[in-house]
Image (spheres, helix red, strand yellow):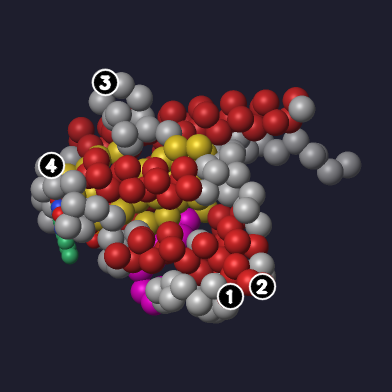
Amino acid sequence: MENLVSHHSVVLLGISGSPRKASTAFVIREALAYAAKKSKAKTDYFSLQGKGINFCVHCDYCIRERKGCIQKDSMTEAYEKMEEAEAFIIGTPVYNGSVSGQLKTFFDRCRGMVAKNPDALKNKVGAGVAVGGDRLGGQELALLTIHSFYQANKMIPVGGGPFGANLGGAVWSRDLGEEGARKDAEGLRTVYKTVDRLVEVAIRLKESSNRT
Ligand SMILES: Cc1cc2nc3c(=O)[nH]c(=O)nc-3n(C[C@H](O)[C@H](O)[C@H](O)COP(=O)(O)O)c2cc1C
C-alpha cells in the first residue's frame, strides 16, 4: 500500500535573485542544504540567473482574463514551483540599498499568478536573505522589500528572531562572490537561524491546517 505520510517536514523553495552564480546563489543553496539535513525539508530551487524574465508591462491582461500572465517566459516554471512550495526563502544581492532589479521584476510578474488565484500564495511562509558587498550596504531594507512582497500576497513573513538574525539572513560578501559569502561565518549564522524559524513556523501552520 502506498505510504501516504510524507517523510518530509515541509516543501521549501529557495529563490536566488542574482543574475550571477555567485554569493547569493551559494547562500540560498546553503540554506536549502541546511533545511534538508536538519529539518527534513523537501527542497526546490529557482535561480534568476540567465532567465531573461521580462518586465511586467501593466497590460492588465491578468486582471481582465484571470488566466495568468500573457507573457510566456521562465516565469511559467517559477509559478509552478511557487504553487507547490509551502515555505520560501528568497535571496537577493543588495543593489543600491534594496533588492536586485531582477528580483523586483520577478515580484512584479507574480501579479499574473495572484490575479488568476488571489489565494495562490495564501498562508505560505516566507523568509529573506540579503547579500551585500558592504557590511551595512542596505541588507535590512532589501529584507523588508522581500517581506513586503510576502505581505502583499497573503503570505506570512518571518525573520530569524532576536539576538542575531532579526529581519532575516544578512550576509557580507565583500564583493568577493561565493568565496566572500563563505567566509562570513556570522552572516551564515543569521541564515541558519532564519531557516530554523522559517521551518518552525511552516510546520506549525501545516500541523494546524491538518487538524481543521
Ligand atoms: C548594480 C549594483 C549595485 C550594488 N549596490 C550595492 C549596495 O547598495 N550595497 C551593497 O552592500 N552592495 C552593493 N552591490 C554589491 C553586491 O551586493 C555584492 O557584490 C553581492 O555580493 C553580489 O551578489 P552575487 O555575488 O550573488 O551576484 C552592488 C552591486 C551591483 C552590481
Residue 190, quarter of the rendered image: top left
Q: Which residue position holds label 4?
A: 136
Label 3 sits on a secondary structure element that is: loop
Q: State which region is magenta.
A: 45-53
Residue found at x 23% / y 49%? 131
| Mark 4 beta carbon near ligand 1 (under 8 Å) | yes
Say which label, 3 or 2, has the lower sequence index.
2
- Measuring from the top left, give residue 70's x and y in whole percent: 57, 78
Spatial distance from mark 4 to mark 2, Cα to Cα? 44 Å
| Mark 2 beta carbon near ligand 1 (under 8 Å) | no
Spatial distance from mark 3 to mark 1, Cα to Cα? 46 Å
Residue found at x 32% / y 43%? 144
Spatial distance from mark 3 to mark 2, Cα to Cα? 47 Å
Q: Above or below — where is 209 with respect to 15?
A: above
Do tag 1 and tag 2 residues touch (Cβ < 8 Å)? Answer: yes
Q: Which residue position holds label 3?
A: 163
Residue type beneath disc 1: Tyr
> Where, quadrant-wise, is the C terminus in this rendering?
top right
Say which label, 4 or 3, has the lower sequence index.
4
Q: Label 2: how many residues lie within 10 Å, few (<14), some (14-19) or many (20+)?
A: few
Quick check: 203 left or right of 176? right
Residue found at x 20% / y 33%? 186
Q: Which residue position holds label 1?
A: 61
Question: Is residue 47 part of the magenta span, yes or no?
Answer: yes
Q: Which residue position holds label 2?
A: 65
> Where, quadrant-wise, is the N terminus in this rendering?
top right
- Measuring from the top left, give residue 23's x and y in whole percent: 25, 54
Residue type beneath disc 2: Glu
Nearest the viewer among 12 and 57 is 57
Residue 55, quarter of the rendered image: bottom left
